[in-house]
Image (cartoon, rainbow, N blue to C red):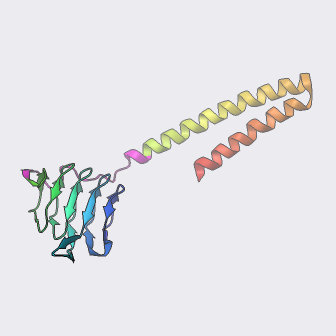
C-alpha cells in the first residue's frame, strides 16, 4: 500500500504486495525495495515497512524485514540489511546502514504550497504574451504579403493564427 502525497521516482519494488509505504514519503530515483532472500535453497519473503514522512535517498536499498520509522531519512546509496529497524526521526546512512544523526520531524518534509503553481501560471502567461506577439508579427507580415503577392499573404496570416490556437490548446491540456 502507498499513502497519500507520496512521491515515487522510478523505484524498483519487488513483490509490491509485501511493501507498505506511509504518507508524505519520497522514494528517490532507483530506490530498491527487495522483500525476498534465497536461504538454504529456498526463497524467503519478508515485508518492508516504511512509516510516514520518510525520505529514501537515490539508489538506497531496503532488504526484506526492514522497517523505517516515521520521520527518518535514508541517505543516498545506503543499504538497510535484513530485519533492520530504525527509530523515529533518524538519519540513516552507509552500507550496511547505521545511524548518522537525528533531526526534527519536519526537517525535510515535502511542502504542498502554492509556489510551484504560481511559477507555472507565470510561465503560462509569459507563453501567451509571446504567442500573441508572434501572432501579431505573423498577421502583419501576412497583410503586407497579401497586398504585394496576393494569396501567399493569406497563407502566412492563417498559419500564424492556427499556430497560436494550437499552442493555446496545448497549454490548456
- Give the residue at x 21% y 73%: 47
- Give the residue at x 23% y 70%: 35
Which residue occupies the foreground of this view, 101 or 80? 80
Quadrant for residue 146, please give it: top right
- Give the residue at x 31% y 54%: 30
Which residue occupies the foreground of this view, 65 or 20? 65
Q: Which residues are magenta?
A: 99-117
Compared across the picture, whether 173 is left or right of 97 comes to right
- Give the residue at x 13% y 66%: 82
Compared across the picture, whether 84 is left or right of 31 comes to left
Residue 143 sits inside the magenta stretch: no
Which residue occupies the foreground of this view, 89 or 20? 20
Compared across the picture, whether 162 is left or right of 54 comes to right
Horizontal and vertical percent position of residue 80:
15, 60
The quarter of the picture where the N terminus appears is: bottom left
Quadrant for residue 52, please give it: bottom left
Horizontal and vertical percent position of residue 45:
22, 76
Label the magenta part by its dominant secondary structure: loop
Numbered marks: total? 0
Horizontal and vertical percent position of residue 106:
18, 53
Which residue occupies the foreground of this view, 6 or 121? 6
Quadrant for residue 37, please give it: bottom left
Horizontal and vertical percent position of residue 138:
74, 30
Amino acid at each position: 500500500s502507498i499513502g497519500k502525497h507520496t512521491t515515487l521516482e522510478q523505484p524498483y519494488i519487488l513483490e509490491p504486495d509485501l511493501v507498505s509505504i506511509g504518507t508524505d514519503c519520497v522514494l528517490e530515483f532507483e530506490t530498491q525495495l527487495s522483500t525476498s532472500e534465497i536461504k538454504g535453497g529456498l526463497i524467503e519473503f519478508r515485508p518492508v515497512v516504511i512509516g510516514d514522512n520518510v525520505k529514501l535517498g537515490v539508489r538506497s536499498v531496503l532488504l526484506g524485514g526492514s522497517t523505517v520509522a516515521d520521520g527518518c531519512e535514508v541517505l543516498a546509496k545506503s543499504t538497510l540489511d535484513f530485519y533492520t529497524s530504525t527509530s523515529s526521526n533518524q538519519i540513516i546512512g552507509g552500507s550496511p546502514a547505521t545511524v548518522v544523526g537525528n533531526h526534527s520531524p519536519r526537517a525535510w518534509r515535502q511542502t504542498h504550497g502554492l509556489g510551484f503553481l504560481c511559477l507555472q501560471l507565470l510561465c503560462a502567461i509569459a507563453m501567451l504574451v509571446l504567442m500573441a506577439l508572434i501572432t501579431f508579427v505573423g498577421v502583419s507580415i501576412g497583410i503586407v504579403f497579401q497586398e504585394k503577392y496576393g494569396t501567399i499573404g493569406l497563407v502566412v496570416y492563417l498559419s500564424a493564427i492556427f499556430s497560436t490556437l494550437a499552442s493555446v490548446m496545448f497549454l490548456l491540456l
